[in-house]
Image: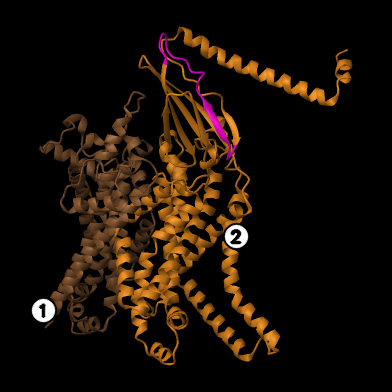
Amino acid sequence: MARKSFRRVLMKRVFNVFLTIIGIMVLNFFLIHLMPGDPISNMIPRSPKFDVSLKWELQEKFHLNDSMPEQLAWYIWNTFTLDWGTSYMANERPVFDIIISDMRWTMLLVGVSTFFTLLLGMAIGAYSAYRRGGAFDVGSTAVSLFFYGMPIFWLAILLQILFTTHPIGISWWPQLPPGGYYDTDTYGAELKWTLPVVLSMMKYLILPSLTLAVGTVAGVSLVMRSSLIDTMTDDYILTAKAKGLTDYQVLRHHALPNGLPPMIALIAMDVAFIIGGAYQVEYIFNYPGIGWRTIKSIGDLDFPILQFIVVIGGVAVVIANFLSDLVLIYIDPRIKIS
Amino acid sequence: MLSNIIDGISRQKRVIIAIGFILLLAVGLMGLTAAPAGAASMLAATPVANAGADVNITAGETIKFDGSASVASDGATIENYTWNFTIFPGTPAHEVYGVSPTYEFDVSVVGGLAVFVNLTVTDSAGLNATDQMVVVIREKPQTFFEKYWLEIFLIGIAAILLSRPVYFVSKSIITGQPIVTDASREKTRLTLQKDRKIFGELMRNPMGAIGVIILVFFAGLAIFGPTIAPYDVKVIDTSNKMQLPSPDHWMGTDSLGIDIFSELLYGARTSIIVGMVSALIASFLGAAVGLYSGYVGGWKDETVMRLNDIVLSIPWLVLMIVVAAFLGQIDLTGIILIIGLTGWSTTARMVRAQVLSIRERQYIERARSIGAGEIDIIRRHVFPNTFPLIFANTILTVAVSILSEATLSFLGLRPAGEVTWGTMLSYAQEASAFQIGLHWWILAPGLCIVVVVLGFTLLGYALDEILNPKLKHR
């Protein structure tokens, strides 16, 4: 019985995910195509000698002469057949290639920073909930709230300035590269996976990932704290204490498992926030990921890239929410019933 | 003798002669200034661009930019003219290129304070040269509605709020019943008592107290800031630009010669207005959608929630940038609408979750059984029970909206003709303020944003703790 209803819930969720993705695509399509400006006039060479027929050729090539619904149908069909077309700019590289190669960098950035965020955030949140009202709790909550309200781009600028100058003339102050993704001057623009390149990559990753982690760790630790405090005041915690368990045992075996579900749901919701933060960080540190490409494409009116790059952010959020739902159903027996 | 001649000429003629003389002088001066450029080009092997002299105009006028005074290098002809317009404060630069030396530009679409015009000429020898001119735009006299839209909006809200008491007072006057009954006196006493209790709790809560203090300070800045600001932020003085901090300019001046400290004070008002009005819009929409779809349920709820999922899933920053690009030139109202119209989905989701539990209560069933309509039940029974939650959430949304505005402005979608903390940061970053020594240009607006957001967040959390029955006893 329970199994059957679980399957039905799963089917409904999958259907919803599919529907949401289609919805994101349609909304995105109309938003982008209603944007003012003519992409073709951005593409044509800036010379009086250019041939007008080139413009018509290009319009024909990119289906820009078709009606809106026709273009929408083409767009959805092409998405699912992975025929994502070529960029208007960038030497007409295939969009799929561009997005995949940009995605590697965003994944690296977001992955590294999220790993540290979760580790640090949950540790800080758990400890301040455990010693509620103590000096550590008050201090960490104040610091968290301070960083919670900080614009990520501002933090990025400050860190960039801090590690590219010598504050008050300290000569041994560490210097970090202000932007880019690895030392292209020394190792060449073509990416080779050798040890020095990887080391240089890690060095270039420190500032962007630190910014993103500091910007998001505050949210995680605050949620962890309040979620744990919620469970710590429940009666079964009192029972566990009365049984004579140590504080650590209570926290590890009774409070944490019950405080975790809201955390997972909120981390999934946070994916959208982290992606937004990654956009700003990539923009300031000139880090060639999805966000940097999006902002560049909006400036260039590069429809083919925009059409897919915005959807990818949305799909990431939808899938994160879907996975968190599944994990919640798996770990929290109370949800299965409803 | 001269005075005799002047006396002999009628007043009208004198004016005409004076104007003619001034015109002659102007033409002569222009010839003098143009002459060295021409003389230089005869010797130079490079072309010389000439975008014309700086002009002052009133917003809404069309200017014809004329680059025909530019000269090509020896033996070559000019092939094209590229006009690059950077609007301050406004959208990113936009560029026009053409073969004709003149270009007409309608400044009414700009709405900024100044336009930096760079003319680049390229000649057939493949050489190019650039010249800059500055168009300073005086503000267009605003129409009544443009000037007072915010006041009209606020008075409208006040009128809606006041309409009920006014209705009751006039009704009791007409019917002759006493205006203040014992029942209403008791009701008021209880409401006041409750409000006082909540305020007391708020001030005893350390987070709430700090939040209130911060917000009172910044409310003062927003109200009196522009009055106490030592300089006018709409007066451009390029000869005075990038001044380091001094007793005259405490935080220095920016790239247009505007006092940074004054900009900071002006920015408080715009930033806080943007935050509050867009949060109100977002909360109103979110609450309406959440209340309705949560109460009605069924397929309507499903549809609304799917739409909500879609809006919630698209990364908010991209959504806002695309909507902003779609609107083209944006002003303060545009920014408010963008943030308000894209920010309702979280509120809607939260309100709906709350409504789902309220819907099953007995008093709702009783109201339904005596034949109350959907809208009536939502308004009279569901809404009052979700109001505390919506209220606390609105205050948290203000914090988020202020951050959104700063981020949008920073990424180049600045409200035209307005100074906010976000636009200040954006220009500071463009001018690499820290390297010049204008540290405050980057530090001060950022710190203000952080502290205001902190204030709203603290107040929001504290109110949530006090008003949300789930969190109260723990």
Residue highlighted by disc 2: B151
Q: Is residue B261 above or below residue B243?
A: below
Q: How is the image coloured?
A: by chain
Give the position of the C terminus of chain B as an image quadrant: bottom left
In this view, the residue in front, B305 or B407, is: B305
Range drawn in magenta: B58-77
User: Counting other residues with Cα less than 10 Å from the Cα at mark 1, is it few (<14), some (14-19), or many (20 or more)?
Assistant: few
Residue highlighted by disc 1: A3
Quarter of the rendering containing residue A215: bottom left
Quarter of the rendering containing residue A51: top left
Quarter of the rendering containing residue B462: bottom left
In the image, the chain rendered in orange is B
Q: In this rendering, does residue A136 appear at all?
A: yes
In the image, the chain rendered in brown is A
Q: Secondary structure at mark 2?
A: helix
Q: Disc 2 residue type? A: Glu
> At 42% across and 46% down in the image, what residue appears?
B413
In this view, the residue in front, B447 or B227, is: B227
Q: In this rendering, does residue B457 appear at all?
A: no
Q: Disc 1 residue type? A: Arg
